[in-house]
Amino acid sequence: METPIIEIDQVSYDYPDRRVLNQVSFQVQQGQFLAIVGENGSGKSTLIKCILGLLQPKGTIRLFGQPQSQFNEWWRISYVSQKAASFNSGFPVTVAEVVEMGLYAKKGLFRRLSRDDRDKVRTALETVGMWERRDSKVGDLSGGQQQRVFIARALVNDPDLMILDEPTVGVDQRYVKEFYEILEELRRDKRRTFVLVTHDIHFVSKLVTDVIHLVDGRLGCNCGIKEYWELDEQTIRSLYPVPGRVLVHEGKSVQ
């Protein structure tokens, strides 16, 4: 059996006023496209921060078979967050320079970029359709274009694992479809693994292979996308604790 890309075992995390993650366990295998869904406050972003080592939870996290505390190949993992909503538009940095920043995780901060490195930058920008804007200031771009740049930065080291934490928050709706079309192209590389935190499970269901649904910090559901749409009414009500009727539309259960 192949070594999981991510292995989460009995992970819990507490903020001073409440427990945000409660004994969560699951594995992510190579080539999976995992969606992490749940209501606001269910622990999705906290879980991502634990995986990335930004928070220190109780329990065990292993990355590529190694205990997280011993893992030192962070360049194999790329992270795309809600950058378009929070990026400082006055910061004087170009599109190419933002992508170049992604190389330093592997090269080291004070190493000069080689011709090969600059070729990688070009390839990453061409992948997201932003090479022609390489000399533009990032602050002059639309939110959708900024997110393309951050995807390019995430791609520049050819990572094995891409983690995306609600990457379309703050992006105009007309760019959201374009963003996911880029992910669909990247998804064709079966070696690469994706973990996506999203509220748009219907929107991305054609990309996703598996779903984890968190409910108040607990693992409410861990299954394939096909099984997720075929959950019984009782399970759906436990995942979505709000009044409503469960209907079936085109073979999918909806509330």
Image (tube, rainbow, N blue to C red):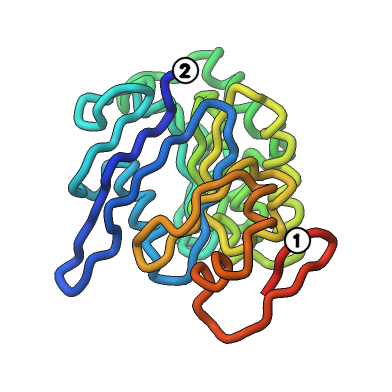
Left or right: residue 215 compared with residue 159: left
Frontmost residue, 180 versus 97? 180
Residue that label 2 marks: 2
**On screen, residue 236 above or below 34:** below
Q: Residue at x 56, y 58 (%)?
A: 198
Q: Residue furthest bottom?
A: 243
Q: Residues within 10 Å of mark 2 (few under 14, many from 20)?
A: few
Which amino acid lies under the numbered mark 2 shown in the image of this protein? Glu
Q: Secondary structure at mark 2?
A: loop
Q: Name the residue located 80 percent from the left edge and 59 percent from the top edge.
A: 251
> Which of the marked residues, 2 or 1, is nearer the chain's N terminus?
2
Q: What's the distance in space between the residues labelled 2 and 1, CA to CA?
A: 32 Å
Position above or below: 91 against 117: below
- What amino acid does circle 1 point to? Lys
Q: Nearer the viewer, residue 166 or 11?
A: 11
Res 36 seen here: yes
Per the image, the residue denoted by label 1 is 252
Q: Residues within 10 Å of mark 1 (few under 14, many from 20)?
A: few
SS at circle 1? strand
Q: Residue 148: x percent and y percent?
A: 64, 46
- Image x and y of residue 131, in percent: 70, 35
Measured along the vertical axis of the image, is residue 114 above or below residue 19?
above
Q: Residue at x 57, y 51 (%)?
A: 138
Q: Residue 157 or 15: which is nearer the viewer? A: 15
